[in-house]
Image (cartoon, grey):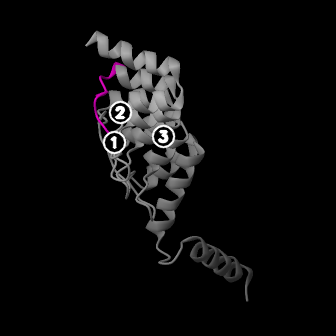
C-alpha cells in the first residue's frame, strides 16, 4: 500500500472511531463543541463555531455547550456561545438551564451575564422544583444569591418539598444568607 493510501486510511479510521455510534461528521463536531465549552477553551470554540454555526448541539442528557460552560463558570465562553445564537433558556431532560447550573456552582459572573441576556430568573426545574435561587441558597452560595436577588428572583417560590430559599438557608445554617434573604423581603 502506498504511503498516501495508508495515511488516508488511518485518518478515515481515526475519524470513524471518534464519531460515536452513527459516525456522522455533525455528531463529532457537536461532541467537540460540548467538550471545548466544558474545558473553557475559547480559541477552540471559535474554530468550531466558524465551521459549525449551530451552538445548541445536545448530548444524551440534552446538555448544550452553554450549559457545560455555565456549569464550570467559563464566562467568556458563555458570552461567545450567546453571541453565536445559543438558546439562553435551553433545558436538559430535568428542566435545568445554564443559569441554574451556574448559580448552583456559585459562578455569579456567569449568572449575571445570563440574566442580562434574558435568562428566566424564576424557572423551576422538573426533578425537585428548585429555582436558581433555591438551589444557590441550598448550597450556601452568597454571591449567586445576591446576584439573583438583584434581578428580583422570587423568594416566595417553593420547591416540591414546600421549601423556599430562606427555608433551605435556615436549615443549612447559612446565617448570612438568611439575613440577606430576609433583608430583601423588607426592601420590597
Image coords of residue 54 (percent x, y): 37, 54
- 1 or 2: tag closer to the N-terminus: 1
How many numbered circles are shown? 3
Residue at position x 46%, y 67% in the image = 27
* Secondary element type, mark 1: loop
Q: Which residue bears the numbered disc 1?
A: 159
* CA–CA distance in space, label 1 to label 3: 23 Å
Q: Which residue bears the numbered disc 3?
A: 70
Height in image: 120 above or below 148? below
* CA–CA distance in space, label 1 to label 2: 7 Å
9 is within the stretch colored magenta: no
**Residue 11 sits in which quadrant?**
bottom right
Residue at position x 38%, y 55% in the image = 92
Find the residue positioned furthest to the top. 187
Taking depth in this image into account, of 21 and 13 the one nearest to the observer is 21
Residue 170 vs residue 90: left or right? right
Residue at position x 51%, y 42% in the image = 71
Height in image: 72 above or below 10? above
Q: Which mark is residue 164?
A: 2
Image coords of residue 26 (percent x, y): 44, 66
* CA–CA distance in space, label 2 to label 3: 24 Å
> CB atoms at circles 1 and 2 under 8 Å apart?
yes
Q: Main secondary structure of the magenta part?
A: loop
* Mark 3 nearby-residue class (10 Å; few <14, some 14–19, many ≥20): many
* Secondary element type, mark 2: loop
* Mark 1 nearby-residue class (10 Å; few <14, some 14–19, many ≥20): some
* Secondary element type, mark 3: helix
* Mark 2 nearby-residue class (10 Å; few <14, some 14–19, many ≥20): many
- 2 or 3: tag closer to the N-terminus: 3
Asked whether residue 25 appears in the rendered view, the answer is: yes
Find the residue positioned furthest to the bottom. 1
Q: Which residues are magenta?
A: 150-158
Amino acid at each position: 500500500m502506498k504511503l498516501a493510501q495508508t495515511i488516508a486510511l488511518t485518518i478515515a479510521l481515526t475519524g470513524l472511531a471518534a464519531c460515536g455510534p452513527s459516525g456522522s461528521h455533525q455528531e463529532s463536531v457537536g461532541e467537540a463543541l460540548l467538550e471545548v465549552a466544558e474545558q473553557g477553551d475559547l480559541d477552540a470554540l471559535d474554530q468550531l463555531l466558524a465551521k459549525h454555526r449551530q451552538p445548541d448541539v445536545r448530548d444524551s442528557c440534552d446538555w448544550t455547550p452553554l450549559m457545560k460552560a455555565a456549569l464550570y463558570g467559563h464566562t467568556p465562553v458563555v458570552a461567545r456561545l450567546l453571541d453565536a445564537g445559543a438558546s439562553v433558556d435551553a433545558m436538559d431532560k430535568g428542566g435545568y438551564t445554564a443559569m441554574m447550573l451556574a448559580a448552583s456552582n456559585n459562578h455569579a459572573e456567569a449568572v449575571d451575564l445570563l440574566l442580562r441576556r434574558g435568562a428566566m430568573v424564576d424557572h423551576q426545574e422538573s426533578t425537585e422544583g428548585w429555582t436558581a435561587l433555591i438551589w444557590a441558597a441550598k448550597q450556601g452560595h452568597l454571591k449567586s444569591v445576591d446576584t439573583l436577588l438583584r434581578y428580583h428572583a422570587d423568594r416566595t417560590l417553593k420547591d416540591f418539598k414546600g421549601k423556599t430559599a430562606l427555608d433551605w438557608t435556615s436549615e443549612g445554617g447559612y446565617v448570612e444568607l438568611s439575613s440577606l434573604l430576609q433583608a430583601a423581603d423588607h426592601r420590597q
